Amino acid sequence: EVQLVQSGAEVKKPGESLRISCKASGYSFTRYWISWVRQMPGKGLEWMGRIDPSDSYTNYSPSFQGHVTISADKSISTAYLQWSSLKASDTAIYYCARGEEGLSDPSWFDPWGQGTLVTVSS
Amino acid sequence: DIQMTQSPSSLSASVGDRVSITCQASQDIKNSLNWYRQKPGKAPNLLIFDASDLETGVPSRFSGSGSGTDFTFTISSLQPEDIATYYCQQYDNFPITFGQGTRLEIK
């Protein structure tokens, strides 16, 4: 079974750093892109960016470029989303999702991880 | 960025009703459109890809149509388990963008 399992909920203070994870299983991790999607409280879905785990090449949405870093460790089939300095406005649920195969054009997201709730509050 | 406009933003219907949601793109995206369902407290899941192809294992009461800028998602006979928010998503251009969502409730 193809599965993405994300790390648990986090509570952080403004200015702190954070890295959340997304562990893949049931398929060849380096074969498919992984995307990250934000959902702020009571709001819709926003695509943040994606990574090709085979070479760690990334694409970011302009809205998130410079605010977050997407990385991957193919030795443990895990993708990461990290912040160097959190803000209260980063409070949201973050989902990872498997995307398209390596050299293919962007497509759909399937499956999705269960989501990680990040709460940033002083 | 390509803007995706879904309508309606919320919808209330009875079990057995035929329900449709529309999604309009701000420019031609060919058939580069997907539909997702997000049940309360859960992650989204893929229902329709490439505008009209049904994902494996998804009930046949779900369907999608359209191309270019105008797309429609239909549930032929609404079931109680269809209570959810539905999103369209375009992948023709970066950044990938979603519609604002349609919240579906049962009367």
Image (cartoon, rainbow, N blue to C red):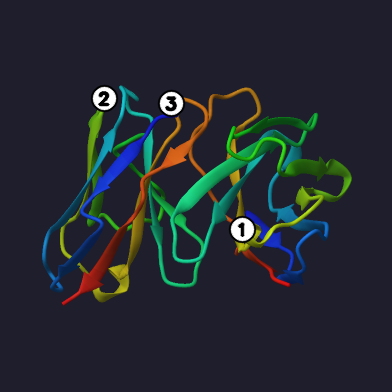
Q: Can you identify the residue that label 3 sits on?
A: B92
Question: In which quarter of the view is residue B1 placed?
Answer: top left
Looking at the picture, how far across and down is residue A98, in whole percent? Answer: 60, 45
- Disc 3 chain ID: B
Task: Please name whichever residue, A66 or A95, is drawn nearer the observer in this view of the structure.
Answer: A66
> Callout 2: helix, strand or loop?
loop
Describe residue A41's horizontal placement relative to residue B98 as left or right. right
Pointer 2 or 3: first along the chain: 2
Do the dots labelled 1 and 3 sit on one chain? no
| Dot 1 alpha-carbon crowd within 10 angstroms: few under 14, some 14 to 19, many 20 or more | few
Q: Residue at x 77, y 68 (%)?
A: A13
Label 1 amino acid?
Answer: Ser
Q: Are marks 2 and 1 in contact (CB under 8 Å)?
A: no
Q: Can you identify the residue that label 2 sits on?
A: B68
Q: Nearer the viewer, mark 2 or mark 1?
A: 1
Is residue B49 in sight in this rendering? no
What's the CA distance linking mark 2 and mark 1?
35 Å
